[in-house]
Image (spheres, helix red, strand yellow):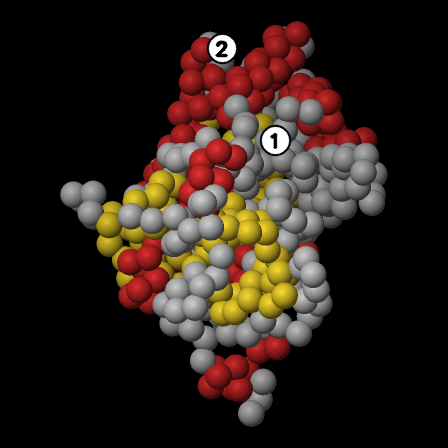
Amino acid sequence: MNKYADLIQQTFDFPTKEFHVEDNKLHFNGVDLMNIIEEYGTPLKLTYLPKISENIQNAKTIFNNAIKSHDYKGNYTYCYCTKSSHFSFVMDEALKNDIHIETSSSFDIPIVRNLYERGKITKDTYIVCNGFKRDLYKKYITELLNDGFKNCVPILDNLTEIDYYLEHVKVPFQVGIRIASDEEPKFGFYTSRLGVRYNDIIKLYEDKIKDNPKVSLKMLHFFINSGIKDTAYYWSELTRFIQKYVDLKKSCPELDTMDIGGGFPIKTNVFFDYDYQYMAEQIVKNIKWMCAKNNTVEPNIFTEFGSYTVGESGAVLYSILDEKLQNDKELWYMIDGSFITQLPDSWGLDQKYIMLAINNWNEEYHNVSLGGLTCDSMDYYNSEAHQFNLYLPKQEENRKQYIGFFHTGAYQESLGGYGGIQHCLIPAPKHVLIDKDSEGKVTHKLFAGEQSSESMLKTLGY
C-alpha cells in the first residue's frame, strides 16, 4: 500500500524543523494540530507566536554576524513592516525583541500612539513613515514629532511632501528620501511609482533641506518588489542605490543611514532553499566595498521585514466536506472555507503555500484539486496554483480528513478584509493564538470566533 506518509518522506526532506508526524497526525512547531482542531473545529486560522520572535532574532544574528565578519563600522536596526499584519498580538510579540516600526498609512499612527501608551515602545523608538501621504497622515506624523518622538522619520515620497513638515513641525526633525527604483524587466512599468527619481534627489536635498537648520537628512531608502534575491537585477539595483548614497553623502554629512527595505523570503514549500547568511554577507560586503572605493563612512543599515517577521507564524486549517468526481480524471475535494476570501494571495497572485494533510498519514493517497465554497470559478487550489500536484489521503466513509496551509501569516487578513463582507458572505473563520509558557508548555486561546451573520447584516445596513 502506498501511504501518504511514504509519499511525503520520499518527496521531501521530511521531517523538518517545523513539521513532524506522531501517531498518524501532523505537528507544527511541536503543536499537535488535531488537538487544536478537536477543541476549536474548522475552518480555523492560527498564529504560532514564538515563530515571530524566532525569525526576528535570526535576522538580527545574520546581519550582526555579517557586520562582524567584514569589520563593518555601521550598525544594524530591525524594523517591522506593520502592514504585513496589524494585529495587536503580532505587534506585542514582535516588540519583545527590541525592534522598531515602519508604517505606511495614516491609521498606523494611532496604533503607534496606543503602543506608546501601553509601554510597548518609547519616544526613542524609530518610526519610519513610508508611503504616499495624504494630509491626515502628514498631520499625524507632525503631531508625533511635535510631541517628542524624535526618531519618527518621514520618508519623502515626492518633491513637495517636505513642505508640509517645514510649515507645521515646531522642533528640529529628520527625514529620509525614498528612491524610485527600476522595476524588474517583466513588470508592467519601468520605474516604481513610489519614491523620488534618482535625478531629483540631490536637487531636493539642496533646495529644501541643506540650508534649513530645522531639518536634516537622516536616511536614504530603497525597496524593490522582487525582494532580496541573488539575481543580477537585485545586485544591479542595490549597487545603483549605494552609489547614489555615496554621491549624496559628499554634500550631506549628516546622512548616516541606508534603509534597504524588506524582502527576506519565507518558506513556501518544503524544498525551500535560501541562504540568508550569504545574502546578508553580500549586502554588507557590497556596501562596505563601495564606501571604501568612494572614501565614504559606512552607513548604518535598516531593514523593514514584514512577511519574514510574521508569515511563518500563520496557518489555516480546513476540513474536507466531500469529494466530487467531475470527469474521468478530475477529482475535487471541497473544503469548508474559501481560498478567495481566506487566502487571497493564492487566488490573486498564485501564491504558493506549504499544504499538508493533518491526519490519516498512514492511508493511501491520490491526486486531487481543492475547491472553495464561493460560487466563483477561480476559488480553487490545484497544481496550477501549486508548484507540484496535490496529493491527499483517500476519502473513506466515517473518516474525516483535515488539511493545513502553512506560512500564511502575512497580509491575508488585511487583503481579505478581516471583519468585513466577503465574497458569497463566507464568514471569517475562528482565529486561535498559540504560545508557550515559561516552562515551554504549549498554550492556546481563542482570539476571535467565527464571524457572525449579525455582524455582516449590520455592515450591510439591515
Residue 251 picture location, percent across and down = 68, 21
| The residue positioned farthest toward the left in the image shown | 439
Amino acid type at mark 2: His
Report which residue position mark 1 lands on.
228
User: Image check: 321 left or right of 263?
Assistant: left
Q: Residue at x 54, y 28 (%)?
A: 273
Can residue 379 be seen in this snapshot? yes
Query: Which mark identifies residue 70?
Result: 2
Of pointers 1 and 2, the one earlier in the residue sequence: 2
Q: Say what secondary structure mark 1 lies in.
A: loop
Q: Above or below — where is 205 with respect to 449?
A: above
| Residue sitting at x 43%, y 61% | 401
- In this view of the protein, which residue sits in the foreground, 265 or 19? 19
- Is the C-beta separation of discs 1 and 2 under 8 Å? no
Q: Is residue 354 left or right of residue 238?
A: left
Res 338 quadrant in image:
bottom right
Residue 351 is situated, as x and y percent measured from the top left of the image, at: 62, 48
Spatial CA span between label 1 and label 2: 20 Å
Q: Position of residue 454 (x, y in %)?
A: 47, 86
In the image, residue 336 above or below residue 236? below
Residue 300 visible? The answer is no
